[in-house]
Image (cartoon, rainbow, N blue to C red):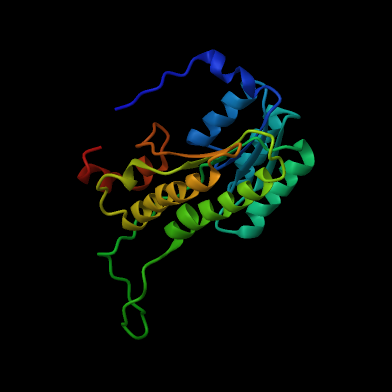
Amino acid sequence: MTSYTLADTDLNSLAGKTILIIGAATGVGRAAVDIAIELGANVAIGDWNEDEGTALAKTLGDRTIFRKCDVSNWDHVLDLFETAHARFGVIHSVLSNAGINTHEGLFTDTRDPSTGRLLPPSLKSIDVNLVGQLYVAKCALHYFAKWPQTRCQLVMTSSAGAFFPAPPIHMYCAAKAGIVGLMRALYPELEGTNVTVNTVAPWLTGKSQSQSQMPHQLERIHV
């Protein structure tokens, strides 16, 4: 497997740049915010948790802004980009990191209590983990096009669940695989431009919401 060792000096160029991070109040997103601020970047923070996001922005000072952002809500996503652009100007990088895990799988039957008829599966995971990524990608590409001479990056968080079996989070795995497909569909059209698009696919992290939400399911996949 190809590996790349990142040196501290590789990150020096972040000073003065603007990074927009969605899903930034906790976990991987929060770690990215801390690193960006430490290295001198401006950070636009988006998260559905308004209390934690507001508190985070207050502790980090003038180089941050926060907007409540449910990525499945187009107006929320667009508002975050508009606010970041108005405050900082060029948006150099976007980390689309928001995501949720849901318990419902395709083997779980939910029925209408009044008729007994089978109900459709919840698409909340698809809405947040895939539709939300599409919304972020659309906004990022729209704004990047304003600065064709500037190097800009879109990074979308997928999951190892896009590549390996992770029962019973079927909707989650399907959505995360869709992110990989989106990245592969976008990058050929960006060749020859100053825009790059990439996907990262982490497994569980130390503060993963999965560890508290789905302990029994995690036992099944030997975590």
Q: Quadrant of the N terminus?
A: top left
Where does residue 119 sit, x and y in percent of width and height?
Answer: 35, 75
Is 91 left, or right, of 116 in this rendering? Answer: right
The outermost residue toward the front is 192
Residue drawn at x 32%, y 71% as measured from the top left: 110
Is 92 left, or right, of 200 in this rendering? Answer: right
Residue drawn at x 53%, y 14% as measured from the top left: 8
Is 190 left, or right, of 168 in this rendering? Answer: right
* Of the pair 210 and 37, the residue shown nearer to us: 37
* Of the pair 123 and 148, the residue shown nearer to us: 148
Above/below status of 32 relative to 176: above
Where does residue 58 sit, x and y in percent of width and height?
Answer: 71, 33
Where does residue 147 sit, x and y in percent of width and height?
Answer: 71, 40
* Of the pair 69 and 201, the residue shown nearer to us: 201
Q: How many marks?
A: 0
Q: Is residue 69 visible?
A: yes
Above/below status of 119 relative to 97: below
Which quadrant of the figure has residue 125? bottom left
Residue drawn at x 46%, y 52% as measured from the top left: 129
Where does residue 68 sit, x and y in percent of width and height?
Answer: 65, 49
Residue drawn at x 58%, y 50% as measured from the top left: 136
Q: Quadrant of the C terminus?
A: top left
Above/below status of 136 relative to 160: below
* Of the pair 122 and 84, the residue shown nearer to us: 84
The outermost residue toward the right is 86
Q: Is residue 70 visible?
A: no
The outermost residue toward the bottom is 115
